[in-house]
Image: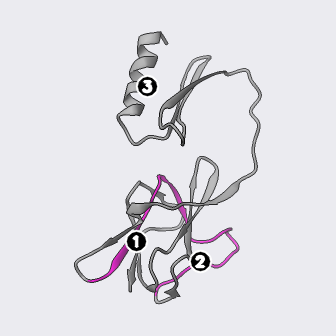
Amino acid sequence: MNFNEIKQLIDIVNSSDLQETIIEEGEFKIILRRSAATAVPQLNPVQSTAPVVQQPLQTTSVASSPAIVEVPSGLIESRSPIVGTFYQSSSPDSPPFVAINDTVKKGDVLCIIEAMKLMNEIEAEVSGTIVEILVENGQTVEYDQPLFRIKP
């Protein structure tokens, strides 16, 4: 991969909503990551022979302004603030955080979205009753995809 190709990749990341991308080509591996403080991708070339260190999963809360949207029926849609995998519970043996007809308060955990080995708790932005769960457990979700419909 030459310098011009790397520069093109940086421009693509800058003009998109991507926070991180990993590109591997043979023995070459490059990670382009947006820094939270500067929102500029960082170029981190990594040798493929370097040992991979598994880090323990961390749970974080995700706060995002586009997390709720009011739909015409008077229901509020709770939307995904990130791309990742949707989980209804904290582990396969645990009960779901919420079910249809459950009453939730603002700040209650609705689900977890795993993104890049981080478990992100998605919290209710409004108090109300869960009317609909729009995704299945283990399903990949996109940014701004509706997850729940809540009757305030």
Residue beneath label 2, please? 97
* Residue contact between numbered discs 3 and 2, judged by CB atoms under 8 Å: no
Q: Residues within 10 Å of mark 1 (few under 14, many from 20)?
A: few
Q: Which residues are magenta?
A: 74-100
Q: Residue at x 35, y 34 (%)?
A: 15
58 magenta-colored: no
Identify the secondary structure beneath mark 1. loop
Residue beneath label 3, please? 10
Q: Residue at x 42, y 15 (%)?
A: 5
Q: Residue at x 49, y 60 (%)?
A: 139
In the rendered image of this protein, does residue 67 appear above or below residue 12? below
Q: Earlier in the sequence, mark 3 or mark 2?
A: 3
As drawn, is 145 to the left or to the right of 23?
Answer: left
Identify the secondary structure beneath mark 3. helix
In the rendered image of this protein, does residue 134 appear above or below residue 1? below
Residue 125: % across, % down? 46, 74
Residue beneath label 1, please? 134
Report the mark closest to the observer, 3 or 2: 3
